[in-house]
Amino acid sequence: MTGEQRPPMATVKFNESHFVALVCVTWLAAFVFYWPIPLNHDVSWYLVSTGRLLDGERAYRDVIELNPPLAFYLTMPPILASRIAGLTPEHGFIGYMFLLMAVSLALVHRLLGRLPESRPLYRRGMLVAVLAAYIALPMSSFGQREHLMFVLALPYILLVAVRMADGACRPGLAVLIGVLAAAGFGLKPYFLIVPALLEIYVVIARRSLRVLFRAETWTLGAGIAVYAASIFLLTPEYLRFIVPMATLVYGAYGAPMNAVIGSMPYPAFLLAAGTYAVVRRAGPTDRMADVLALAAAGFIADYLAQSKGWLYHLIPALASAWLLMMSILLRHVGRQATTASQPWKSAMLYGAVAAVSYLLIGAQTIVPYRNTLAEDLLPVVQKQAAGGSIAALSSYVWVGFPLVNEAHVAWASRFPAQWLLPGVIGRLAHPESLDPTTRQKLADIEHYNLDAVIDDLRNGHPDLVLVDDDSPYFGSDGFNYLAYFGRDPRFAELWQSYVRIGEASMNVGGNRRFEIWCRRYPNHDCAS
């Protein structure tokens, strides 16, 4: 009616349930995004090798892998689930990773809610930051052990911050977090640097050793101890066979420390460290910032200790530094809402924004995984090896993987790549620098590798073999695989069935070329 006032429109308040629903939608959108993307080569190898273990082969005898067995154990659930559900192992693994991320996010959400004096803006912002750390930063290395570890271990890291801020956590929840942390940190011995640093920090800050007797700490320690004992009992070949070989030869994959450091986004890390130092010096004690800074430092130490310079080794350090900067930024924004701005606070804010931007935009990790060699060779493999198998004579894992997975063929080798040879050849090239015992051990490794390659070629009957034309891991003189193996009459006889049908290349630190050899047998003449 004219002159009547209309009732005010109802407003919808954005509450916690709306926020959680928005996070769930983002999680689901990321799941849909990752579903069609190929997994990286290391994860693809684990899917193939773990499947072979589930089919009855034995780890470190029929499947020769450098790393301890926990990665196999953690890969078994998605493969079993995919077989039951009729999915590919790749899709089963993607679903598995997103399930683990959902569990981890739920724990993080609960822990942030138990952080004393934390504002809703801070809790919500940090949960979004954690989601970004899970789905964006490791994009090119999705599912790598570093990614998996961080998803499993982050609740433990945040629980340390909650404890230090005098927040509460029920024993059952703490035990669950400790179990996940044991599964995560146990993937590589280097990862244990981080919980060690955090517990030292707790002891120093509380000035008591009794703070170590927490439910999650006991569970973590017990889990690592049980896992270590299981290696002795279930896979003694790892300690008796793999570790001695790796100790002698895996140094060929190492990089000079200046190159390892040069591969780091060190401007971002320095800026993050500087921003944290300003906060620590000028502001009140921030236990979350302390814990995340220590975690980032520990993961950087883990990266340096591995001495490879491989980008995916930096994922946990990048993710921790990202969460540190977001925590500082969100704390600052929360204070700005109630206090007058100060110049040093503004400088800190700009520094945090710059570091966050560099970590996200400058990091090379935020691109989907792509293997152009696999893309180029896929039609050839589908034509020449359909229903069969392939192999590779190369020191690169990415030559055979994810090509094997994408083409749905078998892998006719016990190795993911010829990782023993570079160290053996390089060290035996200078016998004068070796003592007799070491020289004999290297010769034994060389003989084992030669016999293994010949046995796999004889028993696996690969329809295609990709032969590396060169590899920087052998030094500047290069290496000819066919000339090397062809010196053995057994290999030469088997190789008579193979004909060269082409070549392919991939640009990875230089143009890497590979010859394509096809096995001729009745009804398979390798015609193009």
Image: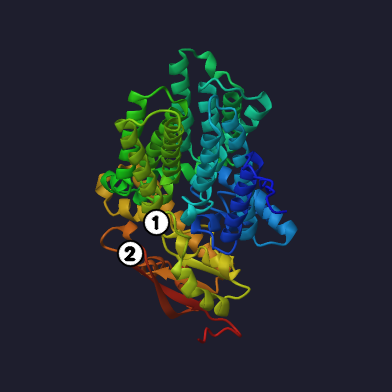
Inspect the image, locate mark 2, and give the three-letter code of the amino acid beneath it: Phe
Foreground residue among 4 and 187: 4
Outermost residue toward the front?
Answer: 3
SS assignment at label 1: helix
Taking the image as drawn, is residue 157 in sight? yes
Q: Residues within 10 Å of mark 2 (few under 14, many from 20)?
A: some
- Residue 506 vertical placement versus 23 (above, below): below
Instruction: Report the residue marked by disc 1.
Output: 421
The residue positioned 71% from the left and 53% from the top of the image is 81
Taking the image as drawn, is residue 56 in sight? no
SS assignment at label 2: loop
Inspect the image, locate mark 1, and give the three-letter code of the amino acid beneath it: Leu
As drawn, the label of residue 479 is 2
Foreground residue among 291 and 90: 291
Q: How far across and how far down the image is residue 213, in percent? A: 57, 18
Q: Assess whether mark 1 and mark 2 are in contact (beta carbons under 8 angstroms).
A: yes
Q: How far across and how far down the image is residue 18, in percent? A: 64, 44
